[in-house]
Image: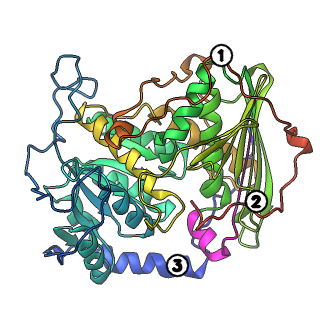
Amino acid sequence: MLKLIQPIDLLMAKSTVRYFQNLVIAFASKQHSHIQHKPQKQQKKRISNIVNDNTKIVWPRKLHINQFVGNSNTKSPSNNGDVDVNVETTLRWGIAPVSLMADDFGAALSILPPQRHQIVSCVAAYRSHAEAFADKYNVENIYTSFEDLANCPNVDVVYISPLNPLHGELCHLMLNHDKHVLCEKPLCMTEDQVRQLISKAQARGLFLMEGMWPRCVPAYHYLRKQILRNRLGEVSHVHCTLGLPVSQSKLALYGGVASDFGIYGLQLALWVFREPPQRVRATGKLNEEDIDVTADIVLEFSRNRWAHIQVSAEEKLENKATITGKDGSIKMTNYWCPTRLTTDRENIDFPLPVDDGFFTHYHNRVSMCYEAEEVRKCILNGCNESEMFNHKESILLANLMDIIYNQLGLGRGVDIHTPILEDEKFQDPSEIVGEAFQSLGFDITTTDGDESTIPASDNKKPEESCSSKQSGPKVLGAP
């Protein structure tokens, strides 16, 4: 076991101190901060095949769907044990807090059938920010206190997206008030914190999911099908790069580049190999505040398979992932949300479910609509986790991050658990296309012949690889 040293002090940056001071002033107040908001009437542009602009939208008040039938493993009654997700039961969302990511999530919800998803409450430190968000998405209730939103009786599930160190505390608050939770990654800052949070969600019979939204997009399901059908032969390695210039003060708020960028490569490797790694090696570069600004991570799996993940907050890298097997390979540009998979033979496109002019702050974030539909399906079926990214994977991911940070010399002052045992391997997700894709009319059938394979391409070993300085594809910002 690696020697543990003092945990990261994320409050060193002056901007971080000011941020948390503002939070204490704005959010810790016990005064009732709710007002009934009357949003301005706006004409919203929607995709024609989802809802007609002239359609009259009625927001029904239905039985609070947090009240599951039976325990977390019990399905609502139907012919096959699952509820029909096409029945128009509205999932009522709370947003905590209003942020750029939350704005993108609101945009993603806006393209889904309005009878399925509705934002009913939001919270922000400044009332003007909450009002602007409420006007944009027709939100009825606005707050300036997290606790007041947690007490809102009309909220079924809360989307959580503050700074990374605040994720765990907010998740506990919402679970304590019987709210389902979708939380942006990372779920918590340490493995112990993740275990405690998951235990609470399971004990209270509530749905909890770490927002690993790439798992829900069509390109990831297509990739998984190719692996299951042995189109690549046995996959031997995964190579990922993600690099974007990020200011030092902003990076400190998010806990470092391994936590903010590296997670995307880690989850892709787990999606491909579907087992815990047997060995982890990590090196990197720290700035003057002991925040990691670059990281080079190698995961070694069984049967001499490996994943190599390179991330940087100093320069732009290629921002690509290559999955290589004995008989072929697939390349993914912007692999946290790819819209194209590339082989030596062809390009396979997965267009976004919106018009070209649709705006989001972060690259391709409108695809969170698939994640939102997955959350709705799980909650209506009485599940407390999603098979797209389940609780065991959240624990394993936190375990890997603890190990990586200790190897980088940034131990968090917690015990590192033994990685998940071999008999707890992940089950392969169903090959059936989920309701998220069906509701948007998206077809992810294969374009190549059933007996064909994808030609292999060259790929360097980890020790031979180097950070690319080529100009990569256009990215609007950090994912």
Task: Tell me the residue at 76%/37% (across/down).
Answer: 344
Viewer-side residue, 247 vs 201: 247
Q: Which residues are magenta?
A: 239-254
Residue type highlighted by circle 1: Glu
Position of residue 28 relative to residue 395, above or below, is below
Residue type highlighted by circle 3: Val
Question: Residue 277 at x, y = what percent?
Answer: 69, 30
Could you give the CA–CA distance between mark 1 and mark 3, rounded to whole angstroms?
59 Å
Q: In the drawing, what numbered circle is on residue 317?
A: 2
Task: Specify whether residue 418 is in view.
Answer: no
Q: Quadrant location of residue 146?
A: bottom left
- On the picture, is 48 further left or further right than 392? left
- On the picture, is 85 further left or further right than 57? right
Position of residue 474 relative to residue 87, above or below, is below
Q: Nearer the viewer, mark 2 or mark 3?
A: 2
Q: What residue did someone put label 3 on?
A: 17
Secondary structure category for the residue under label 3: helix
Q: In the drawing, what numbered circle is on residue 451?
A: 1
Viewer-side residue, 203 vs 81: 81
